[in-house]
Amino acid sequence: MASTLAGRAGAHERQERPIASKSCHRASSAGAGARGILDGVLKNVVAVVLEEIHPFELGVACEVFGLDRTAEGLPGYDFAIAGARPGPHATHAGFAVDVPYGPERLAGADLAVVTAAAIRREYPEPLLAALRGVVAAGGRVLSICSGAFVLGAAGLLDGRRSATHWRHSEQLAARFPLTTVEQDVLYVDDDPVITSAGTAAGIDACLHLVRKVQGAEVAREIARRMVVAPHREGGQAQFVNRPLPEGDSLAPLLDWMRHHLDEEATVEQLAARALMSPRTFARRFQQETGTTPHRWLTGQRVLLAQRLLESTTESVDAIAARCGFGNAAALRHHFGRRLGTTPLAYRRCFADPGLS
């Protein structure tokens, strides 16, 4: 398998500046019939909780959408926490969270983040109806960990792919047979429904949605303030099967690859640089990153293309070359597959307003 690499990503980092958040209508793109990157807005965000809340997963929603970062040039969100009823809700950590709103707060939400809680046989119907109403009105729903069971009970997983914590995936598949549960992945985006695995995978899913709707730089800046990785592919594995020997990490090679994305290289050449056989390299790459070299490289190229479309006036052909795609057609293909839009439509929404 030959994989092309692309240009010095570090050289394209921008200086600090206010970040414009734009909301655009759908542009024509690959994947007709599916919601694309430019659909809708992301302003009114509601975190949904139930009894026996998992505090970390609720904290993820609060950290990404609940903090006011407008003074730093980042977009603001109208954030609230709602449950099946207002009032104190127990957590599994032994303290309570005072929830100010009931299901009615979901009316008009652009996004409902269903956080993790104890899995139950039944869920309150008014809350399930409110979640269905979010989707019916053109909004999105995103679940973290066991929150997928709430979406399943609402019928929102029927006919869609989904994900949850690896410990619950078989239970989710058995309980909701009309959904296809993707085993061991970090998150699944089957727009307008996004489902993610447990704990930190919720961060990945939330940042993925921010990137999808508000642009790569907004997501990157939020990630930088949270001190987390700005992007992990949804298809990556939830965990590494075996620990790597100390000092045997591929991190130096991954860093080299990020800085030489415009240089053509095969997996065999990458394996030689890592002083491994191609078979050992492929296995070690999967262990360490949770994905394949080809998928990892494609994701890095698309991320670089997003940054260049936002921050430069270069042509799509020039950006394709800098990102290692070779030509604009290849860039459009991968951009459409991953983001559901075209490079030019993305630029119209997310380009730096200061560019001429």
Image: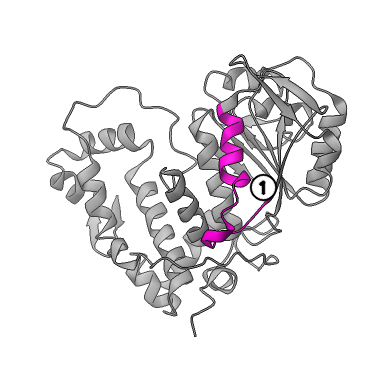
Q: Amino acid at mark 1?
A: Asp
Q: Residue at x 37, y 76 (%)?
A: 318
In the image, 217 versus 257, the foreground residue is 217
Point out residue 135 in the picture as x, y percentages from the top left corner: 78, 45
Say whether residue 262 is left or right of residue 295.
left
Check disc 1 and report its element: helix, strand or loop.
loop
Using a 10 Å C-alpha cutoff, classify the residue at mark 1 as few (fewer than 14 neighbours), some (14 to 19) or many (20 or more): some
In the image, 119 versus 192, the foreground residue is 119
Q: Is residue 63 visible?
A: yes
Look at the picture and state if 205 lies above or below 16.
above
Point out residue 337 in the picture as x, y percentages from the top left corner: 53, 56
The residue positioned farthest toward the front in the image shown? 71
Q: Quadrant of residue 160?
A: top right
Q: Which residue is mark 1?
A: 191
Magenta residues span: 56-78
Q: Is residue 74 visible?
A: no
